[in-house]
Image (cartoon, rainbow, N blue to C red):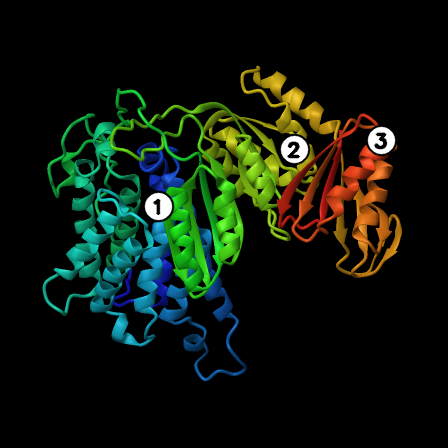
């Protein structure tokens, strides 16, 4: 048996994150298949995997930073280059927080943060033994419950509490980390088997809670960290629909197999959108935000602290949820997902989740919160491209999975994302999804494509129509130069206003409105029937009315439509069809 840690240290945290990621990778599809609460969107396993992946990457980054060494000629280079337990658990918690996905991923992030608050309180051995692990598991379970607006039994919260209760009941104060981890794991397994008897929607579907199943996998990895041996492989239990589950600690009595769906009609539905964002805000502002979001929707989870929070909520008005975040502080990494007809929102005990995929969906990369809301309201699944932080191909693949459709149209809305989007398409196709990539180079081209999208049409015909609409839309943007540089229009200085047409600098000016008017005139000189203006947060308040008046007075029969893009990088996006 390989050597294993006897107490918690940075290396143990690193090993745990790696083993948990492997465990969730193996179980991801099974967990996705039993995901019926709170929304049957089939992505709980994927969300948990992505959350732990972010946590593991943050821990690896800490180890990489310490490998450089803190100074010259250290007395003990190997000792000084190893991060402390506090370094590792704080990184783990922060990585999970910023990478948390979905309802279960957000709760898992709070569980890891709760553990870190105990384990990082003292970098010495006082919190690195079995007693420290027990305290960490208890604080984690309590913190997760506090983060959920309306805790529900039969969920991951129940499984976390049971793990902590079992650890608390471990005999003797001398129990080591391995004994505590094993006891917590067994308590979690037992609680998971009982979840169908606690939550009606699970009982009707004949499955256990997906989030709780993921937590059991994470705790199994903790056992393996301290023992060197993984607990006996455990298949996802699937029960006969409508069968009552009696408490049974021996999960091996439950057989694996395909998820059995219920048979009754869908009797009620819930909010249309899932909204997630990171928020920089003070504690007092977050307390007010919780109340406001609780009134807007359900499945509210707000986790974090020390000025950085992860907000998750299901609402009908996605824009109002984002605006509430703006009032509380600075939201970023905003992700808005529209629940399709295949995603039954199980807010009541009489809801039967549907497992069928939608026939067709649109996935779009958008540069700002306002456009994210616009696209989502049109039924698209959105990926927010933050200024200077373009999405990776994995994010696009994950968005295709969230769309939960047999056919997907992908709108990258950026020429620089061509190769990234192509890689995502290839990956999605290997997973059995029919995907078409429309090479949109701007969000205004995406708007034009989405406007002619008709899901009832044949897939090829729909793609051709959307591609034609995008290709017939010329695009431009107005932005501020960050530095001195050579351009097609001459030399610009930092702070100059640049007007870019089809990606090339065509106008250099000193006034935003005047530059935008010049750009618009040049575009309309070649004709056009519709002008689309997308305003960034920093655009002048009067620019939209000025440009609308310019079009109305100088270009007959040309219509103008204006949207608010939010923090989109550019001051103004212009489209001419």
The residue pinned by badge 2 equals 446
Residue located at (17% from left, 50% from top): 187
Q: Is residue 92 visible?
A: no
Please say if 367 is above or below 11: above
Check disc 1 and report its element: helix, strand or loop: helix
Q: Quadrant of residue 297?
A: top left
Neighbor class of circle 3 (other Cα within 10 Å; few <14, some 14-19, many 20+) is some
Check disc 3 and report its element: helix, strand or loop: loop
Q: Is residue 403 visible?
A: yes
Between residues 67 and 541, which one lies in front from this camera angle? Answer: 541
Q: Earlier in the sequence, mark 3 or mark 1?
A: 1
Position in image of residue 358 (x %, y %): 45, 24
Residue 77 falls left or right of residue 10: right
Q: Residue 270 bears which disc, if any?
A: none
Between residues 86 and 78, which one lies in front from this camera angle? Answer: 86
Residue located at (77% from left, 56% from top): 481
The reply to whether discs 3 and 2 touch (Cβ–Cβ < 8 Å) is no
Cα distance between the residues tagged 3 and 1: 53 Å
Residue 150 falls left or right of residue 342: left
Residue 301 falls left or right of residue 492: left
Q: Quadrant of residue 393?
A: top right
The residue pinned by badge 1 equals 104
Position in image of residue 432 (x %, y %): 47, 26
Q: Earlier in the sequence, mark 2 or mark 1?
A: 1
Position in image of residue 273 (x %, y %): 45, 37
Between residues 368 and 175, which one lies in front from this camera angle? Answer: 368
The residue pinned by badge 3 equals 555
**Which is more foreground, mark 3 or mark 1?**
3
Cα distance between the residues tagged 2 and 1: 31 Å
Cα distance between the residues tagged 3 and 2: 24 Å
Position in image of residue 63 (x %, y %): 45, 65
Neighbor class of circle 2 (other Cα within 10 Å; few <14, some 14-19, many 20+) is many
């Amino acid at each position: 048996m390989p050597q294993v840690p006897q107490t918690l240290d940075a290396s143990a945290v690193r090993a745990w994150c790696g083993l948990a990621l492997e465990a969730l990778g193996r179980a991801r599809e099974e967990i996705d298949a039993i995901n019926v609460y709170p929304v049957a969107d089939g992505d709980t396993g994927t969300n948990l995997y992505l959350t732990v992946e972010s946590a593991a990457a943050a821990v690896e980054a800490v180890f990489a930073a310490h490998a450089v060494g803190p100074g010259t000629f250290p007395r003990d280079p190997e000792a000084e280059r190893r991060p402390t337990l506090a370094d590792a658990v704080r990184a783990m918690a922060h990585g999970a927080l910023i990478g948390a996905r979905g309802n279960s991923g957000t709760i898992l992030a709070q569980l890891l943060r709760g553990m870190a608050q105990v384990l990082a309180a003292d970098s010495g051995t006082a919190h690195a033994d079995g007693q420290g692990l027990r305290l960490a598991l208890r604080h984690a379970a309590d913190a997760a419950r506090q983060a959920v607006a309306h805790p529900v039994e039969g969920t991951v919260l129940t499984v976390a509490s049971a793990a902590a209760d079992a650890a608390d009941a471990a005999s003797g104060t001398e129990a080591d980390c391995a004994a505590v981890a094993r006891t917590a794991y067994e308590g979690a397994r037992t609680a998971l088997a009982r979840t169908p008897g606690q939550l009606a929607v699970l009982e009707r579907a004949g499955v256990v809670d997906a989030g709780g199943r993921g937590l059991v996998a994470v705790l199994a990895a903790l056992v393996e960290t301290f023992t060197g041996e993984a607990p006996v492989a455990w298949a996802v239990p699937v029960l006969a629909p409508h069968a009552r589950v009696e408490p049974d600690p021996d999960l091996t009595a439950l057989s694996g197999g395909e998820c059995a769906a219920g048979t009754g009609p869908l009797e009620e539905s819930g909010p249309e959108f899932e909204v997630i964002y990171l928020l920089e805000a003070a504690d007092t502002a977050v307390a007010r935000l919780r109340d406001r979001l609780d009134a807007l929707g359900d499945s509210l989870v707000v986790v974090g602290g020390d000025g950085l929070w992860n907000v998750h909520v299901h609402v009908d008005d996605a824009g109002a949820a984002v605006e509430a975040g703006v009032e509380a502080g600075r939201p970023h990494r905003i992700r808005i997902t529209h629940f399709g007809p295949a995603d039954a929102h199980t807010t009541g005990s009489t809801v039967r989740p549907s497992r069928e995929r939608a026939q067709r969906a649109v996935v779009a990369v958008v540069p700002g919160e306002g456009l994210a809301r616009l696209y989502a309201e049109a039924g698209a699944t959105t990926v927010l491209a933050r200024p200077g932080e373009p999405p990776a191909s994995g994010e696009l693949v994950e968005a295709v999975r969230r769309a939960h459709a047999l056919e997907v149209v992908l709108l990258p809305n950026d020429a620089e994302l061509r190769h990234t989007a192509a890689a995502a398409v290839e990956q999605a196709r290997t997973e059995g999804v029919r995907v078409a990539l429309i090479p949109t180079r701007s969000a205004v081209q995406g708007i034009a494509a989405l406007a002619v999208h008709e899901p009832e049409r044949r897939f090829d015909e729909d793609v051709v129509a959307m591609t034609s609409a995008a290709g017939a839309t010329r695009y431009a943007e107005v932005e501020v130069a960050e530095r001195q540089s050579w351009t097609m229009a001459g030399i610009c200085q930092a702070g100059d206003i640049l007007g870019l047409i089809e990606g090339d600098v065509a106008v250099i000016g000193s006034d935003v409105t005047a530059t935008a008017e010049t750009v618009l005139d040049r575009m309309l000189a070649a004709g056009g029937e519709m002008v689309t203006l997308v305003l960034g947060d920093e655009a002048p308040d009067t620019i939209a009315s000025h440009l609308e008046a310019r079009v109305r007075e100088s270009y007959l029969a040309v219509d103008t439509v204006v949207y608010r893009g939010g923090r989109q990088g550019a001051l103004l996006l212009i489209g001419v069809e």
